[in-house]
Image (cartoon, rainbow, N blue to C red):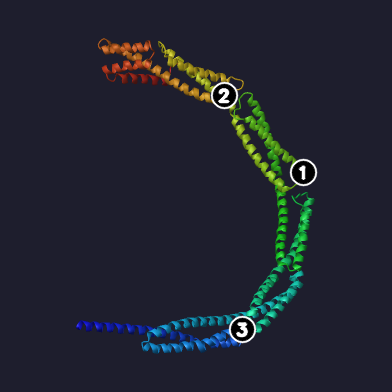
């Protein structure tokens, strides 16, 4: 029973707490809506409405304002009081716990407040826009009025700067001022909506007029003063240069006449106040006149350089011709005795053909300069030919240097062959002095091979026309083979001489040491029958070294000492 009572108390407390919290929530919502009503009421637009009502609006502007005023009055006098009264009733119902009705009515209040708040903001924005437009129109009237005064003042004070454009500009400014008066009447009537489009058009037209006033004077100045003076100056310059036999790639007199016609055409553009066309043609005239100046300057400078380089060009060409003549004579003479293996003659004749082309250009220029030529073209050709002569001279020197040493090389080759012949004969004598029983086939074959090479070189040098490239290659090979033959010859001389000494020394051991006797016999056979002096020395020296250690070094050292003494004090 106690538990049941406690449960009832808890349930009752929970119900009470839920009712209390729900009631409190509703009370907060009602208060927030009342705050919203109060905010709109406190944000009165009466002052703004009164200010705009004094603007004497008319037409579409007045119709729009009247609708705004009507909507505002409906909010202030009907919609807000209705919502406020409904909120008071809801507050009373909430106190009496009529939550179902309160919830239903709050949804209606929320919808009405959202709609009213949105409409109020829209009204406020529109009033601000009317005030803004009004100020802009008033400011525009003031600015445009000042601009027209300045434009009129400029046209009157500087009419001479506008030339043929002056009358048309006066007319257009008058039309612009009339449009301004028409706009001002609409604006002063209070119809700002209707006057919005004319204002934009008027501002654009005014800006266009300002650009014309700014751009026409410099164009007219060019047409009146600058271009005529330049055309006159250029005509005089062209006449003078033509008398001095200058020639141009285009007819400058005709071009200057065409420029003058364009000047006249642009004066018509100014008369019609076609500023865009006038600007475009003004730039074209400026470029065309600059082109004539550049052409004259180019030819004048070119002639100065051509005439300045004339003597150098002439001397350089004559020098190249003279060198080419001498080179061909030298090559012809050398070709009788030497084979020219590097296309020297062909290259020299090609250089001769190039020189003739340069000579042809030079002679044509010399002939035509009295009749008149295009100096810029001649300057380009002159530079190309001078560069060509530089390359020709360089190649002439290369050819000359290449063949100038042929005679010297021939003499050096002859001297080398004589030296080879002496050397191989010396080797033969050295071998013969030894009275050897014979020589190996390998050595004799190599000896005769080198001898034949020397003989072939000698015969090549005795030809009527010799090939120094081939002879030089043969000299290198023969020298290498001769060095090898020298090594082989020295080896035979050294080994044969030492073998004889070792054999003689071995006689003292032959009867006592059978191995010495055997080695002696073998070495003697290699020496006298096979002519293998190297192996003979190895056999007998190794055997003696076993019996008497150190003997090989002692005998060879003595031999080297004798050899050095012989080389130092050779016998006559």
Residue visible at 73% across and 69% down? 273
Who comes first in sequence, dot 1 or dot 2? Answer: 1
Within 10 Å of disc 1 (Cα), the crowding (few <14, some 14-19, many 20+) is: few
Mark pair 1, 3: CA separation: 91 Å
The residue mark sitting in front, 2 or 3, is 3
Q: Dot 3 lies on which element?
A: helix
Who comes first in sequence, dot 1 or dot 3? Answer: 3
Would residue 153 be seen by someone viewing this image from the given angle? no
Q: Nearer the viewer, residue 64 or 209?
A: 64
Total numbered labels: 3
User: Residue 291 location, x and y as percent?
Assistant: 71, 56
Q: Quadrant of the C terminus?
A: top left
Horizontal side of 524 relative to 442 (left or right) equals left
Q: Quadrant of the N terminus?
A: bottom left
Q: Dot 2 lies on which element?
A: helix
Where, by quadrant of the figure, is residue 201 drawn?
bottom right
The residue mark sitting in front, 1 or 3, is 3
Where, by quadrant of the figure, is residue 20 drawn?
bottom left
Above or below, comparing residue 524 to residue 135 in the picture? above
Would residue 415 be seen by someone viewing this image from the given angle? yes
Q: Nearer the viewer, residue 489 or 15?
A: 15
Per the image, the residue denoted by label 3 is 63
Mark pair 1, 2: CA separation: 54 Å
Where, by quadrant of the figure, is residue 470 drawn?
top right
Within 10 Å of disc 2 (Cα), the crowding (few <14, some 14-19, many 20+) is: few
Per the image, the residue denoted by label 2 is 411
Residue visible at 31% across and 21% down? 553
Who comes first in sequence, dot 2 or dot 3? Answer: 3
Q: Dot 1 lies on which element?
A: helix
Per the image, the residue denoted by label 1 is 368
């Amino acid at each position: 029973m106690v538990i049941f009572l406690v449960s009832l108390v808890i349930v009752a407390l929970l119900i009470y707490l839920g009712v209390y919290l729900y009631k409190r929530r509703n009370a907060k919502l009602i208060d927030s809506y009342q705050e919203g009503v109060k905010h709109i009421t406190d944000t009165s637009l009466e002052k703004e409405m009164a200010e705009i009502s004094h603007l004497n609006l008319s037409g579409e502007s007045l119709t729009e304002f009247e609708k705004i005023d009507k909507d505002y009055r409906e909010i202030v006098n009907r919609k807000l009081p209705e919502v406020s009264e409904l909120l008071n009733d809801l507050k009373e119902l909430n106190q009496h716990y009529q939550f179902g009705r309160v919830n239903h009515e709050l949804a209606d209040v929320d919808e009405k407040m959202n709609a009213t708040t949105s409409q109020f903001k829209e009204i406020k924005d529109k009033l601000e826009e009317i005030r803004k437009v009004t100020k802009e129109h008033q400011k525009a009237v003031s600015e445009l009025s000042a601009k027209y005064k300045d434009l009129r003042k400029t046209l009157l004070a500087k009419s001479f700067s506008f030339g043929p454009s002056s009358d048309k500009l006066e007319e257009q400014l008058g039309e612009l001022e009339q449009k301004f008066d028409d706009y001002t009447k609409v604006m002063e009537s209070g119809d700002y909506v209707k006057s919005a489009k004319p204002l934009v058009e008027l501002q654009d037209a005014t800006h266009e007029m300002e650009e014309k006033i700014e751009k026409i004077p410099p164009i007219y100045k060019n047409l009146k003063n600058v271009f005529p003076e330049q055309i006159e100056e250029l005509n005089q310059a062209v006449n003078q240069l033509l008398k001095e036999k200058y020639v141009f790639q285009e007819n400058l007199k005709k071009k200057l006449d065409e420029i003058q016609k364009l000047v006249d055409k642009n004066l018509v553009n100014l008369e019609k106040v076609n500023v865009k066309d006038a600007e475009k043609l003004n730039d074209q005239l400026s470029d065309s006149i600059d082109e004539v100046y550049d052409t004259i300057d180019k030819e004048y400078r070119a002639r100065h350089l051509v005439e300045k380089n004339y003597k150098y060009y002439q001397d350089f060409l004559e020098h190249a011709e003279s060198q080419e003549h001498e080179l061909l004579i030298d090559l012809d003479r050398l070709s009788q005795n030497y084979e020219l293996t590097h296309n020297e003659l062909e290259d020299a004749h090609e250089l001769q053909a190039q020189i003739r082309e340069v000579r042809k250009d030079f002679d044509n220029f010399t002939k035509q300069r009295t009749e008149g030529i295009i100096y810029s073209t001649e300057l380009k050709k002159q530079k190309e030919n001078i560069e060509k002569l530089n390359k020709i001279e360089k190649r002439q020197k290369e050819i000359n240097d290449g063949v100038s040493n042929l005679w010297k090389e021939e003499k050096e080759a002859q001297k080398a062959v004589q030296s080879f012949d002496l050397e191989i004969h010396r080797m033969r004598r050295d071998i013969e002095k030894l009275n050897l029983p014979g020589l190996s086939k390998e050595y004799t074959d190599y000896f005769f091979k080198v001898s034949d090479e020397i003989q072939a070189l000698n015969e090549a040098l005795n030809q009527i026309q010799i090939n120094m490239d081939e002879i030089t290659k043969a000299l290198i090979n023969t020298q290498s083979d001769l060095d090898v033959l020298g090594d082989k010859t020295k080896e035979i001389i050294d080994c044969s001489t030492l073998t004889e000494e070792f054999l003689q020394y071995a006689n003292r051991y032959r009867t006592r040491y059978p191995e010495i006797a055997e080695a002696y016999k073998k070495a003697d056979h290699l020496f006298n029958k096979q002519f293998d002096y190297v192996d003979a020395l190895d056999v007998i020296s190794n055997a003696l070294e076993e019996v008497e250690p150190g003997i090989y070094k002692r005998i060879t050292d003595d031999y080297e000492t004798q050899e050095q003494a012989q080389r130092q004090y050779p016998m006559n």
